[in-house]
Image (tube, rainbow, N blue to C red):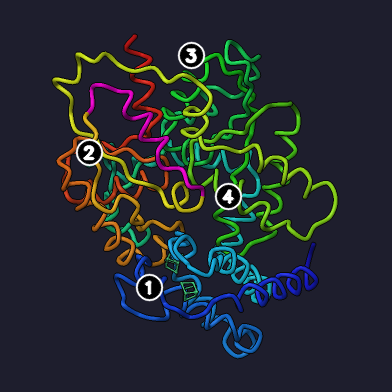
Amino acid sequence: MSGMKALTTLMNELEDQLIVCMRCGMCQAVCPLFAETGREADVARGKLALLDGLLQEMFNDPQGVYDRLNKCLLCGSCAANCPSGVNALEIFIKARAILTGYMGLSSAKKLILRGMLSRPDLFDRLVEWGSKFQRVFSKPVNEVIGTSCARIVSPLLRNRHFVPLAPVPFHRMIPSLNSDPGSSGIKIAFFVGCLIDKLFPQVAKDAIDVFNHHGVGVFMPEVQGCCGIPAISSGDTVTFNRLVNHNLRIFDAETYDYLITPCATCTATIKEIWPMMVKDDSGDTKLKVDEIAEKTLDINQFLAANVDLEAGDAEDRGEAVGITYHDPCHLKKTLGVLAEPRSLINTNSKYRFKEMPESDWCCGLGGSFNLQYYELSSNIGGRKRDNIKATGSSIVATGCPACMMQIADMLSKSKEKIAVKHPIEIYAEVLNSK
Ligand code: SF4
Ligand code: SF4
C-alpha cells in the first residue's frame, strides 16, 4: 500500500478500534508516564479521546496531535491491562503513521531513518566508523557496568552514562552461519538485532555457544537489517517497509523451524507489529510476514521449551551472590514471557535469585522517548533503579538490550556497582563452567 490509499485504510482501522474504549480510566493506574506527570493527556484514555477527533484535529493542529501522541513510551502497559481489550499500542502506532504520512518526516529523521537505517550495509559501516572515534568525545565512567559519559558538554549526550559501541560488532566476529541440526533435531534462524550486534555482541556470542551446545542448527544470514521499530514508532512506514522486505528476503534463503532473537523488542516487533502493518495487504508479503511471525520466538522461551536446560554445581549455592530480574515490557506485557528468563537464571547456582518490587514497571526508555524527554525518562528509570537496589543484588538481568541500556544509565549515574546482564549470559556461564 502507498500514499493516500494507505492513510485512508489506516484511518478506517483506527476509527473501528477507537470506539471500543469505554473511558473507564483503568489505564491510569498502570501508565508509568501518568505516574510521573499526573496529566490525563498523557494516559491512554486522554490520547484516545484526542484521536477520536483525529480527522478534524489533523487539519487544525497536526503538530500538536503528533507531539501529544509522541509523549508515550509505547510500553503497552495500558493495552495489557485494559478490561475492554483496547489495543492502544496498535492505535498509537497507526496514528503516528497517519500523522507522519500527512506532515512528512523532519529532515533529521529523514537522514537517520531513510538515509542510514534503511540501508543495513551502510548503517553497519557508519556505526563501525563511529566506534573508532567515540573515545574522542567520551570516557569510561563505571567499570562494573561498562558505561561511558561525555568528555565535554554535549546537548545530545547530556549527563547520560551510556553503553559504548563495541570495538568489534558481532557481525564482524561471526558474519554468517548455516549449520545443520545436531542432537536437538531443530534448526533455527538467528535474528541478532542492532543493539545486541553493536553494543552487546557478547550476548549473541553466548547465544551461538548455547545453540551449539544443545545441538541446535543455526542459520544466520549476512547484513541483517533493523527490525524496523525506530522507523515505525516515528511513523515512517517507508523505512519500515524497506527493512521488513530486506529481512524477509535474506531469511527466505533457508528453511528453519523457528526464528529466534535475543532482543525482546525485536521479537515483539516481528511477531506483532509486522503482521499489524500488513494486515490489509494481499499477496506474497503478507503471507511471508505471517509465516515468519508465527515462527518467531524469544530466545528464553525457545530454550526453556525445546532443550533440557543444564544446572550449575549445587555446591556453589553456599557462596552465591544476589541477582534480580527486570521484566521488559515487550517480553511480559506484549508476549507473555516471564517464567522462562527466570528459569534460565535459576540454572546458575553461583547466583541467588531475588525478585525486585514492581519487576514489570517500565524502565522508562521508550526508544526515542528517552531522546526527547530525557528528564521524564530518567524519573521513570529512577524508580526501577531504586527497586533493583532494594534487592541488594550484585547483578540485574533483563531480556532486552534497550532496557539494559536504560538500567545501565540509571545505576551508573548513581555510582552503583551492579552489573547489567542478559539471561543468556547467565546461562552460558553454567555451560562454560562444565
Ligand atoms: S483504554 Fe481501556 S482502560 Fe483505558 S479508558 Fe479505554 S477502556 Fe478504559
Ligand atoms: S503505552 Fe505506556 S506510556 Fe503510553 S499511554 Fe500506554 S501505559 Fe502510558
Q: Nearer the viewer, mark 1 or mark 3?
A: 1
Q: Nearer the viewer, mark 2 or mark 3?
A: 2
Residue identifier under label 1: 28
Residue type (three-letter) at the residue carrying disc 4: Thr
**Which disc number belongs to residue 213?**
3
- Provide the residue span drawn in magenta: 335-351
Task: Determine whether the residue tagged by mark 4 lies in a helix, strand or loop.
Answer: helix
Disc 2 from disc 3: Cα separation? 28 Å
The quadrant of the image that shows the C terminus is top left
Find out whether the residues at labels 2 and 4 contact each other: C-beta distance under 8 Å.
no
Find out whether the residues at labels 2 and 3 contact each other: C-beta distance under 8 Å.
no
Residue identifier under label 4: 269
Disc 2 from disc 4: Cα separation? 30 Å
Measuring 59% from the left and 66% from the top, which residue is drawn there?
107
Which numbered disc flags the more N-terminal residue, 1 or 4? 1
Q: Quadrant of residue 316?
A: top left
What x and y, as percent, mark residue 395? 24, 35
Q: Is residue 260 above or below residue 174?
A: below
Which numbered disc flags the more N-terminal residue, 1 or 2? 1
Task: Determine whether the residue tagged by mark 3 lies in a helix, strand or loop.
Answer: helix
Residue type (three-letter) at the residue carrying disc 1: Gln
**Which disc number belongs to residue 354?**
2
Disc 4 from disc 3: Cα separation? 28 Å
Return the residue nearer the eye: 253 or 30.
30
What x and y, as percent, mark residue 219? 64, 24
| Residue 428 as seen in the image, left or right of residue 354 | right
